[in-house]
Amino acid sequence: MLPLDPQADPGRRAWVACPRCADAHGCEPCEQRRTCSTHWRYLLTNTGSMLHLQCPGCTHVWVHESGFGATRSAWDRATDARPGF
Ligand SMILES: [Zn+2]
Ligand SMILES: [Zn+2]
């Protein structure tokens, strides 16, 4: 298990299925792609539409291409615009 990233903040979440533990399997709100209160991931950083995520369950870290970078619709509150990153 990796340690939680120092940037992991419960106030910045993303609802993306974890590719490692599949903990949302069989969960109704997740399968309907709603914002589940149980299954969410830490949004560490995002660069354009690339989201750096960490699963609070298995601490797996991965990059997810959200496709939302241009519109920023769903990710406005999650934007972490660190200069130079
Ligand atoms: Zn996981
Ligand atoms: Zn769920």
Image (spheres, grey):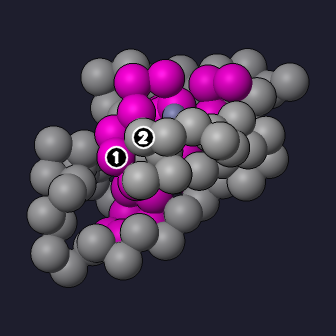
Q: Quadrant of the N terminus?
A: top right
Q: Is residue 79 left or right of residue 36?
A: left
- Element carrying mark 2: helix
Q: Which residue is located at x 41 percent, y 69 percent?
A: 66
Toward the viewer: 39 or 71?
39
The residue at the point 28 percent across, 72 percent down is: 68
Identify the residue under disc 1. 34
Give 55 or 63, whichever is nearer the viewer: 55
Tag count? 2
x then y, percent, for residue 71 = 14, 75
Image marks 2 and 1: residues in contact by CB distance under 8 Å: yes
Above or below: residue 74 compared with residue 50 = above
Q: Position of residue 52 (x, y in %)?
A: 52, 51
Amino acid type at image mark 2: Pro
Q: In whole angstroms, how far apart are the C-alphas of marks 2 and 1?
A: 5 Å
Residue at 49% across / 23% down in the picture? 38
Q: What residue sits right under mark 2 in the picture? A: 29
Say whether mark 2 is within 8 Å of ligand 2: yes
Q: Earlier in the sequence, mark 2 or mark 1?
A: 2
